[in-house]
Amino acid sequence: MAAFSRRDFYQQLFQGCIAPTAQQGLEQVWILLLICLCCRLLWRIGLPSYVKHLSTMAGGFYSLYHFFQLQMVWVVLLSLLCYLVLFLCRDSSHRGVFLSVTTLIYLLMGEMHMVDTVTWHKMRGAQMIVAMKAVSLGFDLDRGHAPSIPSPVEFMGYIYFVGTVIFGPWISFCGYLQAVEGQKLSFPWLRKVSFSLLSCLLCLIISTCIAPYLFPYFIPIYGDRLLRKWLRAYESAVSFHFSNYFVGFLSEGTATLAGAGFTEEKENVKWDLRVSQPLNVEFPRSMVEVVTSWNLPMSKWLHSYVFKNALSLGTFSAIIVTYTASALLHGLSFHLAAVLLSLGFITYVEYVLRKRLAAIFSACILSKCCLPGCAHQHKTNLWVRGVNFLFGVLAIFHLTYLGSLFDVDAEDSTEEQGYGMSHTVHKWSELSWASHWVTFGCWVFYRLIS
């Protein structure tokens, strides 16, 4: 009877969830994929550069309208405002700062006053990409990494680059210029696009149809009331993780399909754009590895344009400023801010604790893998592997706790509006604030051995 029940469950799961989810996912993105491919083919013709910029701008505009209809005007207003500020500050050496302040004020006013919460949250990803591109361009101009202020057509082509305008990822202005030059079509390019799109479809199915039923249907683990809470929290965390991987692989696919995301080594072109590294998140060495592997382009952006600029305030202050900036970019959502700021404290405490332990025992137990030829005496000993494994288990514990906020049973309207403070407090109270207490204990231990 149990076997029949399980078999019946799998059959219902396929017919009622997996097949419809895959079909709906393809229906949502096929137009965007077609536009990316058309732009890629158009750039191979050898058109003048301004025509290429206009074509990707037109493709980006149509994609925005397809996904957001007339609400796309708020994304357009932000891009126009950014270019206006860039033009007015063309002789300044602080263009990155001015653009950062401008985008921050616009995003805060938009969320609090100009647009209703549900509509703004739907456009939040596109707004974030526009803000990141404008700010990075400003700082690159200040540092001399970009030759000169781009023309309006170049700037708008970069902002509305069809491969990144909806789902990202962030790419630099130089990366955009390389993309519109039009690399030749090749089998490695097609293989990369196919792998990314198939991976994104698989992650969508896992997030929607498998993760919510992980225990006990797929993994037969049962337990008492407390254990069930943690198992449910882990299901929510895994579902949220794979929804992020879905967006990551989809953005890989659209950006690569449009011609971005490659590196050149002599005459070899490698299509090696990576947005997420799921294995480093699900089986982590440390929380530091998790936050960098979660979204590689955004991690690079935060490190290059926020952390480095804030480093003069001190390492801990720079970390908090970086996570605060990430929270503001993601919107005024209490649960996201709580997760990101908690991540800031967790990663800092883990980093300094493991750094101190590595110095005491002269062992390769840092948050990140040591480079070959490091000065540590103990590199691959069994106890070194054991310590790294325990810190990895601790990272999974933190991820489960933090991911419990993204409840798989929540209603769609609640997710669209964002979870409030009461939801965050309730979820973490159910788990006895365990992750925060463990982090505090690790910090006390670090202070004792310092």
Image: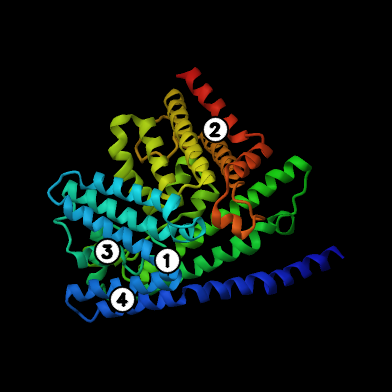
- The local secondary structure at tag 1 comes to helix
Give the label, 3 or 2, closer to the camera.
3
Give me the residue at 57% from left, 38% from top. Answer: 394
Residues at marks 4 and 3, CA–CA distance in whole angstroms: 15 Å
Residue type at mark 1 is: Gln
Identify the disc placed on residue 71.
Answer: 1
Which of the two discs, 3 and 1, labels the residue nearer the N terminus? 1
Q: Nearer the viewer, residue 443 or 34?
A: 34
Query: Percent position (x, y) of residue 187?
Result: 36, 75
Residues at marks 3 and 2, CA–CA distance in whole angstroms: 50 Å
Query: Percent position (x, y) of residue 227?
Result: 73, 42
Query: Percent position (x, y) of residue 56?
Result: 29, 72
Does the residue at mark 3 contact the one at mark 1 (Cβ under 8 Å)?
Answer: no
- The local secondary structure at tag 3 comes to helix
Residue picked out by circle 2: 383
Does the residue at mark 3 contact the one at mark 2 (Cβ under 8 Å)?
Answer: no
**Mark 3 surroundings: few (<14), some (14-19) or many (≥20) residues within 10 A:** many
Residue type at mark 4 is: Arg
Residue picked out by circle 4: 40
